[in-house]
Amino acid sequence: MSDPFGAEAELINIESHFYQGQYQEVIDFDTTSFSAENALPARVLQLRARIALGQAEDVLAEVAGEKKPELEAVGALAQLKAGDAESAVETIEQLAATDAGEIGIVQVVGGTVLAAAGKADEALALLQRHQGNLEAVALIVHIYLAQNRTESAVKEVASARRLAQDSLLFNLAESWVGLRLGGDKYQQAFYVFEELAQAPATSSVRSLVSQAVAEIHLGRTEEAQAALDQALKKEPGFADAIANQLVWSVITGQDSAEHKAALEQADPNHPFLTDLAEKSDLFDKAATKYKAKVSA
């Protein structure tokens, strides 16, 4: 059991803000009283939060020339978000090939970069070197679900239960898996997301969208729309909220054209649009095989 007054406990609040997607709160968090041991992890969280809020170029300039592996990894994440995926991947692969690959922050940030760059297997190989790091576990679960490897995700969550089953990260990872498994797991996931989304201290656009997704799975379309409206009121251009509005409109029989156009404007490379384009192309190819032939 961890010491409630130990070094790990000092990071709990700023980490919780980060995992809940409350990035501005992370940036504004007063870390001046933190121990020397936690100064770097706290700084990394704040830099990652700034990247998430679109400040990749500023972060890249700030960490340029830094020799600490943790900050080099953050620099790679900033490079990725700034559009230089090739350099970002190269940096992470170099770090992973050295002793730096045993550092938890390098594993998590590096795994994030590799997964986002389409190198999921490399990301998993790096993340699986972790030593009880729940953020690494959560990212592994996320990657497995993206690969439709639900059974592997279930096993990962089961093995992580012994680490800290009452932690926020564990509850989130278990809820992601629950949304994939369905049945009564939908309701369990909803309880987790609703608690985060509706409490003023923990509410964020991400928790609201997660609540909406659970509501959609439960067939509660009006409640889902209310949660999405809340999310977009907080952040009008949040692509994941718009993507789920698009899904909601299709499910409820509404015209989805407006939402599709809004998503294209917010994030032209959003995975939903990429997947939609791929499936549309496959449908068109399949349809050509069954076109009626007109005889002369």
Image: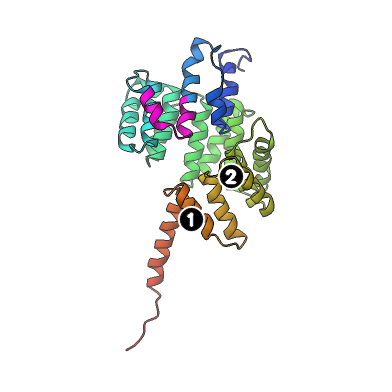
Residue at 64 percent of width and 32 percent of height: 202
SS class, disc 1: helix
Residue 219 showing in the rendered view: no
**In the displayed structure, would residue 24 be above or below residue 141?**
above
Residue 158 showing in the rendered view: yes
Residue type at numbered disc 1: Ala
The front one of 15 and 176 is 15
What's the magenta region? 47-62
Q: Give the Cα distance between marks 1 and 2.
A: 15 Å
* Residue 141: image location, x then y, percent: 51, 38
Residue type at numbered disc 2: Leu
Task: Work out whether mark 1 precedes mark 2 in sequence or the reverse, and give the earlier one.
Answer: 2
Question: Would you name the residue on which mark 1 appears?
Answer: 261
Q: Is residue 60 magenta?
A: yes
Question: Would you name the residue on which mark 2 appears?
Answer: 232
Residue at 36 percent of width and 30 percent of height: 76
Residue at 58 percent of width and 16 percent of height: 10
* Residue 147: image location, x then y, percent: 46, 45
* Residue 130: image location, x then y, percent: 46, 26
Q: Is residue 239 magenta?
A: no
Image quarter where the C terminus lies is bottom left
Residue at 60 percent of width and 46 percent of height: 179
For residue 72, side relative to residue 232 (left or right): left
SS class, disc 2: helix
Dot 2 alpha-carbon crowd within 10 angstroms: few under 14, some 14 to 19, many 20 or more: some
